[in-house]
Amino acid sequence: MRLRSTEAGWGVLLRTFHWLIAALILAQAVIGLSMVPMGVTPAKVRVFALHKSIGMTILALALLRIAWRMGEKRPVDPAGMPRWQRGAARAVHLTLYFLILAIPLSGWWFNSASNAPLAWFGLFPIPSLTGGYDPVWKPRALLTHQMLFWVLVALLVAHVGAALWHHFVQRDDVLRRMLVGSRERNGGG
């Protein structure tokens, strides 16, 4: 398993970022959707704190992933892949990167406008973006956070659907090159 990406596949670090961020986003979706109907209780406060900490973790991991990705090779697209598919894939990936950054930032913005405390897993405080309670920006930040989440859901359905289509219908390496433990062409590993 190579640390860096090659023309045949993504490196282990980018694959780790990909799957870790994907797992955390899935956890965030479950936590976020389940905490909304909860009554105002100490349990809800703990769940919100967990949601916020995981969101900040996703933001940090996404920034690290983008920084690492900027110095990486991109695996070669499968032979015969139409240009429109390559363009669509790149557009979806760029939009996913944007959303993976924008959603935690909008949550941080909402938390700041709510004047709620934010401490990463209770270990250290994260400063407010608004300087305190802001009744104008609070509902806007929440609406932005929620709308961006549903756009992300739609794009992830398309992303996963396209990966499965490539794997099961096209039978190419698009999905395989992102799977942990995949082998490079020509017998490498």
Image (cartoon, helix red, strand yellow):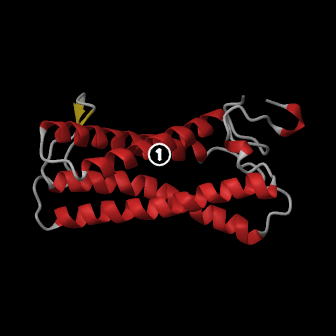
Helix, strand or loop under label 1: helix
Residue 7 higher or lower than 158, as above or below: above
130 relative position to 74: left or right: left
Frontmost residue, 111 versus 3:
111
Seen at 73% across and 43% down, the residue is: 177
Q: In what quadrant of the picture does the C terminus appear? A: top right
Seen at 81% across and 37% down, the residue is: 184
Q: Number of numbered discs present?
A: 1
Seen at 65% across and 67% down, the residue is: 88
| Residue 150, x across and y down, in percent | 41, 63
| Residue 144, x across and y down, in percent | 31, 65
160 relative position to 130: left or right: right
Q: Quadrant of residue 103?
A: bottom left
Q: Amino acid at mark 1?
A: Ala
| Residue 74, x across and y down, in percent | 71, 49
| Residue 46, x across and y down, in percent | 21, 36
Residue 120 higher or lower than 158, as above or below: above
Frontmost residue, 117 versus 66:
117
Q: In what quadrant of the picture does the N terminus appear? A: top right
Q: Residue furthest bottom?
A: 84
147 relative position to 43: left or right: right
Q: Quadrant of residue 139?
A: bottom left
Residue 108 higher or lower than 149, as above or below: above
Q: Residues within 10 Å of mark 1 (few under 14, many from 20)?
A: some
Seen at 59% across and 65% down, the residue is: 91
Residue, disc 1: 62
